């Protein structure tokens, strides 16, 4: 039964869960079933609201309890923190989920928990909830379940039959940093459950080839998260880790979470005035290049450039380092080449590839289609004698990368990047 | 310049295409009757909507375009935008002259129709995102919307599939009709004879206290609590929030309404 007391508990447990950035409800299409509540739409998922920090709210992201036996330095719920603690009862949590869902507030549930007693005990309680939701409440919507590091294989096997997606957070890309901040954890405790989930998914795939109606196992795959700016890892370390993770067949998303100074008293952690949002944004852009733009990680960051350029996006940064690749002819270049042009996204590239079968494209056509010509115009040639009749050609090769760069960085971007560099200085002290 | 006028129905528009070919003309604009006329207007031809002619044009289109492109035309029509008429009319005429040009986005008419259809699709997604139900005492879930485009028919399948065991009513306050699903049969279109006597407010979508189910107020409070708690204050970004969730949708959003007690 829900009461006024539930309000307080929900508040505490939401505030404890909110630093986990994963929220998507994507990766699986499941039609509604007679006698069940809900469906999943796949594709991009559905965001039901946007909080005041601009982040999307798709799932009910909540912890079962924020009591925890671990003392990880970066975590708000660490045992030594003096914060309000609460535990939702199983029925409360199930009821909130169902009632929220029926009112179209959410796409489903993202459930995690602090570790109490031992990992298996905690995992068992989480599993009981998702099992109840599926069997007792006939819930057919999205369930994202956080797997507890150290939980046994049997537990994960059972939980995976009810969850759509499972995740284990890496948090810190390098093991030595992780050891420093979370002495009770190791990379093994993260990668082992990841491997177990993957094994379960792949076995399930084989089973489903033989038996079409075999129940599905974590059909929307896995995701994970890395904290950015809490330790001294470079963007290269982070992106190297991401590309290794994406090589795994079941890893769908890696999230990057700009570190919010939650435990300011801990000397092992930097004190940041604000989270490194520009850096986080650049990492996501780089992540997109890896996943949708056919970039390799060593094209984005290498030995000379271990960190992403905060002033320009990673694709533009790559283009400025590779003037020999340009100009790209819009009317003849293949799709992959178009994707490399700054200002052209997957949508613009698709529009171009389709339209040029009818007639040669001019820069005016591109502008109307919505291509960001501000950047693209320095990197392309169109079907024109001269780009603009009155002006001489101004491409990246005529201007040189050094000459072009200032034209593409706005004052506001420069200021934002500079402010954030300031943060980094605080950190190295 | 030749101008056609029509009665602002799909049949009228398709008839205009038929007439243009029958009269061997290439009109430059298709206007609604009563629209302001352009400056250099040679003559105006008034199209009389004819179902049979419209059907013939539609069948002809189906032969020339893919299912995807046909859907795009239907969807664009739901935009109810005046500026769709001329581009859509010229686009359809061009299909009969040039064949399947649906993906020639360098053509201004194709691009305009595609962009309008995209706008409509964007708004139907927003309805799937932002519809908020309240539960009435009799177990019916109610939501009020007032979208810019007439998208209600595009989203009923989604809600019927998702909430197949709960009766619901989604009502378009701007266009004065809704869809009601009784929990079993397909959703049906409904209108109210006397809109002022319905037990909910068209302005903010709130059910009146007499019919609101007893736990609904608490659930709305829980949702508002959750909405506030999930925000990380160090990362406040109202601009991002506004661009993803424009203010015109706020009036029916539970989380943006204040608690009433």
Image: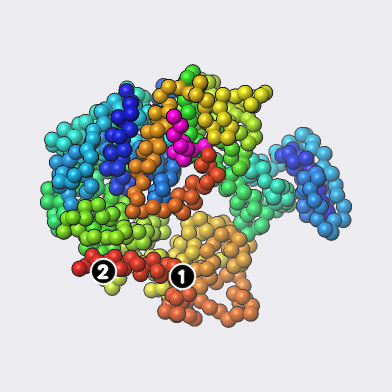
Q: Is residue B188 visible?
A: no
Which secondary structure, mark 1?
loop
Residue sitting at the far front: B261
Quadrant including the N terminus of chain A: top left
Residue B53's place in the image compared with B210, above or below, is below
Spatial CA distance of label 2 from label 1 is 23 Å
Question: Which of the two labelled residues, at mark 2 and mark 1, occupies the earlier sequence position?
Answer: 1
Give the numbered dot on residue A90. Answer: none
Residue that extends furthest to the right in the rendered view of this protein: B43
Kindly state the secondary structure of the residue where label 2 is placed.
Answer: helix
Q: Position of residue A100 (x, y in %)?
A: 40, 31
Residue visible at 56% across and 66% down in the picture? A331
Q: Nearer the viewer, mark 2 or mark 1?
A: 2
Q: In the figure, is residue A72 to the left or right of A220?
A: left
Horizontal arrangement in the rendering, residue A247 relative to residue B185 (left or right): left
* Residue at numbered disc 2: A425
- Give the residues drawn in magenta, as a range: B252-261
Q: Quadrant of residue B217?
A: top left
Label 2 environment density (alpha carbons within 10 Å; few <14, some 14–19, many ≥20) = few
- Residues at marks 2 and 1, common chain? yes
Task: Give the percent coordinates (x, y) of residue B37.
Answer: 81, 52
Q: Report which residue position mark 1 lands on.
A: A410
Of A190 and B235, nearer the camera is: B235
**Pointer 1: residues within 10 angstroms few (<14), some, or many (20+)?**
few
Q: Does the segment drawn in magenta span residue B187?
A: no
Q: Is residue A107 left or right of residue B113?
A: left
């Amino acid at each position: 039964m829900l009461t006024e007391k539930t309000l307080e508990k929900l508040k505490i447990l939401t505030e404890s869960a909110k630093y986990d950035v994963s929220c998507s409800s994507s990766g699986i299409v499941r039609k509604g079933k007679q006698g069940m509540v809900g469906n999943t739409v796949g594709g991009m998922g559905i965001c039901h609201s946007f909080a005041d920090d601009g982040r999307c709210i798709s799932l009910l992201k909540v912890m079962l309890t924020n009591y925890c036996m671990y003392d990880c330095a970066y975590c708000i719920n660490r045992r030594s923190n003096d914060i309000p603690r609460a535990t939702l009862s199983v029925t409360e949590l199930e009821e909130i989920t169902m009632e929220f869902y029926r009112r179209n507030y959410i796409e489903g549930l993202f459930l995690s928990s602090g570790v109490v007693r031992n990992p298996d005990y905690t995992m068992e309680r989480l599993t009981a909830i998702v099992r109840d939701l599926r069997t007792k409440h006939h819930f057919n919507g999205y369930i994202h379940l956080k797997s507890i590091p150290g939980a046994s294989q049997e537990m994960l096997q059972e939980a995976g039959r009810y969850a759509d997606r499972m995740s284990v957070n890496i948090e810190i890309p390098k093991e030595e940093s992780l050891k420093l901040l979370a002495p009770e954890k190791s990379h093994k405790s993260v990668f082992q459950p990841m491997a177990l989930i993957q094994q379960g998914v792949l076995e399930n795939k084989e089973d489903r080839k033989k038996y079409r109606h075999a129940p599905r196992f974590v059909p929307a795959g896995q995701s994970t998260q890395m904290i950015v700016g809490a330790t001294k890892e470079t963007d290269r370390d982070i992106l190297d880790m991401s590309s290794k993770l994406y090589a795994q067949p079941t890893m769908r998303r890696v999230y990057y979470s700009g570190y919010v100074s939650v435990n300011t008293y801990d000397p092992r952690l930097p004190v940041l005035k604000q989270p490194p949002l520009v850096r986080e944004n650049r990492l996501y852009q780089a992540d997109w290049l890896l996943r949708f733009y056919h970039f390799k990680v060593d094209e984005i960051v290498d030995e000379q450039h271990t960190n992403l350029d905060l002033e320009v996006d990673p694709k533009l940064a790559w283009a400025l380092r590779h003037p020999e690749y340009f100009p790209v002819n819009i009317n003849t270049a293949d799709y992959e080449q178009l994707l490399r042009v700054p200002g052209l996204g997957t949508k613009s590239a698709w529009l171009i590839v389709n339209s040029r079968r009818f007639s040669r494209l001019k820069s005016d056509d591109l502008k109307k289609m919505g291509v960001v010509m501000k950047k693209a115009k320095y990197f392309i040639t169109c079907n024109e004698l001269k780009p603009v009749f009155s002006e001489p050609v101004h491409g990246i090769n005529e201007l040189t990368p050094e000459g072009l760069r200032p034209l593409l960085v706005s004052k506001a971007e420069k200021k934002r990047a500079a402010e954030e560099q300031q943060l980094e200085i605080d950190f190295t002290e | 310049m030749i101008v056609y006028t029509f009665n602002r129905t799909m049949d009228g528009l398709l008839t205009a295409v038929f007439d243009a070919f029958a009269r061997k003309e290439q009109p430059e604009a298709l206007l609604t009757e009563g629209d302001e006329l352009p400056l250099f207007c040679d003559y105006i031809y008034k199209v009389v909507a004819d179902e049979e002619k419209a059907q013939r044009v539609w069948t002809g289109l189906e032969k020339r375009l893919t299912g995807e492109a046909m859907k795009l035309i239907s969807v664009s029509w739901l935009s109810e935008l005046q500026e769709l008429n001329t581009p859509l009319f010229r686009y359809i005429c061009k299909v009969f002259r040039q064949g399947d040009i649906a993906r020639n986005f360098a053509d201004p008419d194709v691009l305009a129709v595609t962009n309008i259809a995209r706008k409509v699709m964007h708004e139907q997604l927003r309805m799937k995102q932002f519809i908020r139900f309240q539960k009435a005492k009799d177990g019916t879930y109610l939501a009020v919307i007032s979208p810019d485009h007439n998208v209600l028919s595009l989203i009923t399948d989604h809600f019927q599939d998702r909430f197949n065991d709960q009766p619901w009513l989604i009502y378009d306050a701007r266009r004065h009709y809704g869809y009601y699903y009784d929990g079993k049969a397909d959703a049906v279109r409904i209108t109210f004879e006397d809109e002022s006597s319905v037990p909910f407010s068209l302005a903010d979508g709130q059910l009146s206290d007499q019919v609101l189910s007893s736990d609904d107020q608490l659930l709305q409070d829980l949702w508002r609590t959750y909405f506030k708690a999930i925000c990380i204050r160090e990362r406040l970004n109202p601009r991002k929030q506004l661009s993803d969730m424009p203010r015109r949708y706020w009036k029916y959003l539970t989380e943006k309404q204040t608690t009433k007690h």
